[in-house]
Image: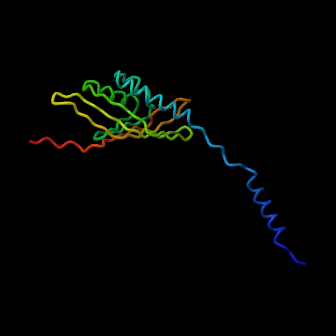
Amino acid sequence: MRLTARPFLALAISLAAACNGGAKAPAPVDTAADEAAIRAIDTNWNAWLAAQNDSAIGAIYAADAVLMPPNMPRVSGAEAIRGFWAGLWPIKATLALTPVTIRVSGDWAIEEGNWTMSIPATAGEQKDNGKYLVSWRKDAGTWHAVQDIWNSDNPAPAPAKK
């Protein structure tokens, strides 16, 4: 009796299909609505910065959020973060955020962008610019900033001479 490979090949294919359960690849997830929601928050954020509305800015952050400004200690909690932003108003700083990419995965998103800042000064306007990362978490259908970090693209100023 001579066995051929054909029945064994058919059996192997049948077993492979059975193990797979006929499952199809998952459909791609449409994250456009979540990305649009975060971009809308960014648009409002810029408006609230211009209006010096630290209460609205503080509400962007989750209660357990962390702000990590350059050359400063971290700021933890939405209320402390609101206070950080309020501290900018006396120096009349203007700040603009421009998101570059927003990547959404479920209830988490990462935003990468650029920022520019200007501070009027008696000896001339000070300007700075750089990049930032914000991690977002969706809680009860609303996106909140959880981690916010940025740094400058420019070299640190030279220390004052004594």
The residue at 23%/33% (across/down) is 126
Instruction: Estimate the x, y position of residue 6 in percent, counting from the top left.
Output: 83, 69
Instruction: Estimate the x, y position of residue 17 in percent, counting from the top left.
Output: 76, 56
The residue at 81%/64% (across/down) is 11
Q: How many marks?
A: 0
Instruction: Residue 116: name its quadrant.
Output: top left
Which of the pair 141/2 is nearer the observer? 2
Instruction: Name the side, left or right, on which 5 lies relative to 49.
Output: right
Instruction: Estimate the x, y position of residue 55 in percent, counting from the top left.
Output: 39, 23
Instruction: Residue 65: name its quadrant.
Output: top left
Instruction: Name the side, left or right, on which 63 lies relative to 24.
Output: left
**32, above or below 47, in the image:** below
Q: Quadrant of the N terminus?
A: bottom right
**85, above or below 104, in the image:** above
Q: Quadrant of the C terminus?
A: top left
Instruction: Name the side, left or right, on which 107 lies relative to 5.
Output: left
The residue at 38%/33% (across/down) is 97
Residue at the extreme bottom: 1
The residue at 45%/32% (across/down) is 62
Which of the pair 104/72 is nearer the observer? 104
Instruction: Residue 135: name its quadrant.
Output: top left
- Colouring scheme, one of rainbow, by chain, secondary structure, one colour: rainbow
Instruction: Name the side, left or right, on which 32 lies relative to 27.
Output: left
Instruction: Estimate the x, y position of residue 35 in percent, counting from the top left.
Output: 52, 35
**28, above or below 124, in the image:** below
Residue at the extreme right: 1
